[in-house]
Structures are given as structure tokens and as C-alpha cells.
Image (cartoon, rainbow, N blue to C red):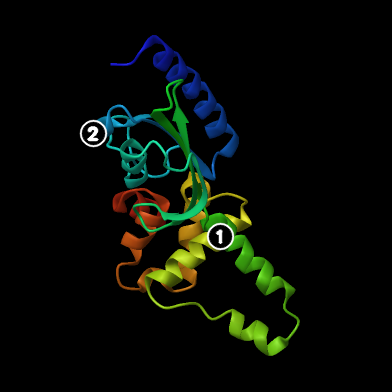
Amino acid sequence: MHTPEQKHLLEQLKHIAAGLGQTLAPFGEVVLHDLSDPEHAVLAIYNNLSGRAPGDPATELGLARIADPEYAQVVANYPNRFPDGRQAKSTSIGIKDSEGNYIAALCMNLDLSLFQGLQSMLGQFSRVDAAAAISETLEPAGSDAVRAYIDKFAARHATTPRALGADQRRALMRELKDAGLTDMRRAMETVAAHLGVSRATVYNYAK
């Protein structure tokens, strides 16, 4: 059970998390964890990118804070990964009550796929060696090629793969087909996972 002080603190943290979620969208999700209930620690989640939901259990870092009040209060910019394989950069801030006990954690998880796509585009754009430019057009094989193409497409539209609109997704499927990438093994499954939609939805966009 929470004390009145802890309840008030958690309510205020919800507002902070909501504001951060709106500010970081569509690139980052913000998760508020209630560390007093590790089995159902996720109290609120904003701009959901990881597929978690309120009531989900604490992460390893959350459990470490519960076990050790001296655990670092701020763990910033550590590498992470979303369930579908997208790379992320995370920051976790532990929140203590007046007695020095961890009661909550405010976590931010940034989707790096858009920025990696932009980095790739900028790297290609800045090259002046013609031979290097030709080699730069070679795509990686298999599912990596499909994901790389989707990242670049999203970067051209200044968004992330999961934030693409319906018309953009249809245009993406046309481009993938023209590039011969939809003929690859498990191409549709890869597209669906990277966009965060069902295979049926992808096939509908491809019509």
C-alpha cells in the first residue's frame, strides 16, 4: 500500500511522463514504473513503442533498484532493444520517497531506426568518390535489406516506420515491389513486423 506522500508523487509523475511522451513522440516512449509492485510495475506508458501495457512486470533494472536502495538513481543513454529487434537508447530515472526508498522509475526509450536511416542517407550524400557511391547502393541481403529500405523510406518522410500513414505505407509497398524486395523469402512478415502491423494489413497495402 502506498502512503499519501507516495500516491501524490506517483500522480505527479504521471503528468511528467505524459508531457515527456508528447514531446518525444514519435521517436520515444515514456514508461512510469511503480516499484512497490514489481509483478505489475508498469503504471503508465505513453507513445507506446515496445508493445507493453499497464500491469506488465518490472524490467531487470527495476528489480535491481528494488533490491538495492543504493543503485544508481540515473542510468542514462544505455543501449536497449525493442521486442521486434529495433535498436533503442534508454534512460532510466529512479524516484525515491522521503525515506530514501525507491518507489518509482521514469524510463525513456528512444527508437533509433529513424536516426540510423538519416545517418545512412547523410553518409551516402556526403560521398564524392563515384566508385564509393556505386558500392553504397548495394543493399544487404534478406530481411536486413527490407528493414534497411523501410528505414530509409521513413527517413525521407521525416518519420519512423511505425508512424507512416496509410498512403505512405502503400507507396512504400510499391517501392519495395519495384526494387524486387517483396519477392524475398518472408518479405511480408518482415515488413509487417517492422511497421508494427499484421501480415493481412501489409498484403492489403500491397494490392
Asked whether the viewer can see residue 207, the reply is no
Left or right position of 2 against 98: left
> Which x, y percent locates residue 69?
39, 36
Label 2: few (<14), some (14–19) or many (≥20) C-alpha neighbours in 10 Å: some
The vertical placement of 26 against 128, above or below, is above
- Which of the image's four quarters has the C terminus? bottom left
Asked whether the viewer can see residue 4, the reply is yes
> Which x, y percent locates residue 16?
54, 25
Kindly state the secondary structure of the residue where label 2 is placed: helix
Judge depth for marks 1 and 2 and give the one in front.
Answer: 2
Residue 39's label in the rendered image is: 2
Q: Quadrant of residue 129?
A: bottom right
- Which of the image's four quarters has the N terminus? top left
Foreground of the two, 205 or 129: 129
Q: Outermost residue toward the top?
A: 4
The residue that label 1 is drawn on is 153
Foreground of the two, 2 or 154: 2
The vertical placement of 174 against 124, above or below, is above
Foreground of the two, 26 or 95: 95
The vertical placement of 183 against 162, above or below, is below
Residue at left offset 54%, top offset 42%: 26
Q: Amino acid at mark 1?
A: Phe
